[in-house]
Image (tube, grey):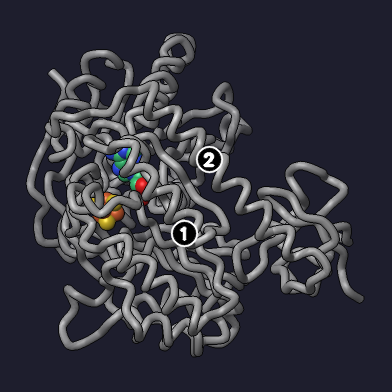
């Protein structure tokens, strides 16, 4: 029998974080001793699927692991611990997870000391946990999205347990501040400002896996940003499923625009970004705050999902095509150089050719800088899964290809308009595609490659754009 706990989350016991800290300290001692005895440091590998929220959760897990004297590795053969941080937004993400866990079966046979943990959104669904238990009994630990702060204790307990340890909280608890994680302080830092979602778009599993919406206190967020900046971070991205409804669960009348204005005052931070915005909640004060705040980048990720009003209604999105276009006009009137990106779903149940033409029409009217396009994927437990008129796969793919071509054509045209212009680039690293070059991003989040000395990494430089591609720009440093 494996030890399974599926419980409602509890009020946070003040002793809880203290207990986790003590466990971290003990593990640190144990792992350092292991290193003295063997000359080898314990190594952990985290495989992350899905959105930036998950990336950030993985960063927190890695922080805790580093405090336990684990070193990060990306080589599975040398790992003592492998964590899969899963995503269930679309079926293909899930299939990838299953395939990748399965690939560890033989490695685990060879190295019985190897620890394997699976966490994240998929684990919030009981039937998925059941199938992990059945198909992948070699997994040591399963935990969910709401109890990641208990990871140190769960890890230690799973290492001494004979069977798979499962602890998933059905519901979110209060927001937990001060989790003993030690983050990677990089040039760019992610900060959660809210968790969960109340929107229940009919295709989406997120409200069921990440729970109801709750916002962090403004002071805690400002403090975290100040701390990041003191440790070298220059660009901060605020994360939430729907950042525009930030503040709804807080006492007093605090809104997202207030948070943006407050963060714009933090000394030392150069750029502030945020995602994701829901069109129905993007208020005028937010547009004004972005227009006024010199640190707030002129880029808005504004998923529209579908162009047809009939489909938008069936999706429960809370706006119309005309309303979306009017919002874009208001944004462009106040922030003329704003770049706009979006998410689009193709083949939502009942989508006809005519409905799809509305999606194409909206893309042509707005002219997005880029877009993430998704084939509709049935998510069990969501209302859209039971809608009768599922779209034929072949039709979905044909529409998808047409849409991608249209988007790429527009992206290429927008990028070509940058040739000859000067842009401000935060230099991030050596270019991934050409190691002779450096790469960075403009305030509009455009990827720019250019020749330059590595000493420029971490600096903001002026670049003249000399060439444009669909997904990137090439430029040269202006001396
Ligand atoms: N099928 C396809 N795409 C989806 N998304 C969310 N749920 C689904 C689904 N069931 C897309 C939406 C969302 C993005 C993160 O993922 O476009 O904005
Ligand atoms: Fe999912 Fe809609 Fe919430 Fe976004 S706003 S997380 S698409 S339910």
Quarter of the N terminus within the rendering: top left
**Judging from the image, what secondary structure is the residue with disc 2 in?**
helix
Vertical order, 276 against 264 (above or below): above
Residue at 72% x, 64% y: name it: 417
* Front position in the image: 402 or 50: 402
Q: CA distance from mark 1 to mark 2?
A: 40 Å
Q: Residues within 10 Å of mark 2 (few under 14, many from 20)?
A: some
Q: Which mark is residue 182?
A: 1
Instruction: Return the residue found at the far front.
Output: 354
Q: Identify residue for label 2.
A: 404
Q: Position of residue 465 (x, y in %)?
A: 81, 64
Residue 25's place in the image compared with 35, above or below, is below
Which residue is outermost to the right?
479
The part of the image, by quadrant, that contains residue 127 is top left
Indicate which disc, 1 or 2, sits on the residue closer to the N terminus: 1
Ligand 1 within 8 Å, label 2 CB? no
Q: Between residues 386 and 207, which one lies in front from this camera angle?
A: 386
Which corner quadrant holds the C terminus? Answer: bottom right
The answer, for residue 26, to whether it is visible in the render is no
Q: Residue 237, can we see it? A: yes
Which residue is drawn at the image coordinates 51% and 36% (left, top)? 402
User: What residue sits 22% from the left and 36% below the top?
Assistant: 350
For residue 75, what is the image quadrant? top right
Q: Residues within 10 Å of mark 1 (few under 14, many from 20)?
A: some
> Percent x, y for residue 352?
29, 36
């Amino acid at each position: 029998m494996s030890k399974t706990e599926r419980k409602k989350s509890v009020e946070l016991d003040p002793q809880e974080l203290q207990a986790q800290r003590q466990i971290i300290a003990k593990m640190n001692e144990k792992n350092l001793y292991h290193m003295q005895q063997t000359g080898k440091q314990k190594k952990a590998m985290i495989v992350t699927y899905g959105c930036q929220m998950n990336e950030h959760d993985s960063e927190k897990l890695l922080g805790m692991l580093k405090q336990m004297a684990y070193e990060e590795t990306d080589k599975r053969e040398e790992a003592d611990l492998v964590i899969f941080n899963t995503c269930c937004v679309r079926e293909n993400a899930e299939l990838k997870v299953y395939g990748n866990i399965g690939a560890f079966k033989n490695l685990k046979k060879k190295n019985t000391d190897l620890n394997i943990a699976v966490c994240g959104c998929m684990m919030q669904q009981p039937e998925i946990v059941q199938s992990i238990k059945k198909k992948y009994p070699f997994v040591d630990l399963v935990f969910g999205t709401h109890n990641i702060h208990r990871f140190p204790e769960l890890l230690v307990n799973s290492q001494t347990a004979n069977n798979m340890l499962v602890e998933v909280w059905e519901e979110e608890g209060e927001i937990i501040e001060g989790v003993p994680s030690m983050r990677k302080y990089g040039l760019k830092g992610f900060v959660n400002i809210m968790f969960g979602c109340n929107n229940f778009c009919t295709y989406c599993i997120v409200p069921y896996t990440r729970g109801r919406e709750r916002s962090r206190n403004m002071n805690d967020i400002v403090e975290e940003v100040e701390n990041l900046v003191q440790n070298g971070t220059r660009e901060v991205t605020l994360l939430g499923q729907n950042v525009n409804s930030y503040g709804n669960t807080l006492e007093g009348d605090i809104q997202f625009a207030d948070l943006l204005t407050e963060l714009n005052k933090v000394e030392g931070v150069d750029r502030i970004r945020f995602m994701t915005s829901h069109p129905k909640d993007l208020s005028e004060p937010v547009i004004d705050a972005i227009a006024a705040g010199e640190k707030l980048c002129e880029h808005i990720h504004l998923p529209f999902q579908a162009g047809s009003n009939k489909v938008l209604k069936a999706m429960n999105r809370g706006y119309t095509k005309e309303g979306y276009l009017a919002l874009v006009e208001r944004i462009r009137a106040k922030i003329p150089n704003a770049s706009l990106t979006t998410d689009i779903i193709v083949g939502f149940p009942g989508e006809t050719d005519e409905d799809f033409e509305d999606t194409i029409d909206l893309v042509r009217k707005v002219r997005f800088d880029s877009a993430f396009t998704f084939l509709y994927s049935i998510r069990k437990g969501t209302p859209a899964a039971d809608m009768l008129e599922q779209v034929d796969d072949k039709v979905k793919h044909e529409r998808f290809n047409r849409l991608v071509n249209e988007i790429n054509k527009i992206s290429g045209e927008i990028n070509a308009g940058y040739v000859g212009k000067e842009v401000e680039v935060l230099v991030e690293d050596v270019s991934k595609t050409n190691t002779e070059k450096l790469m960075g991003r403009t305030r509009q989040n455009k990827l720019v490659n250019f020749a330059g000395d590595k000493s420029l990494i971490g600096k903001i430089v002026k670049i003249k754009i000399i060439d444009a591609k669909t997904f990137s720009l090439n430029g040269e440093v202006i001396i």
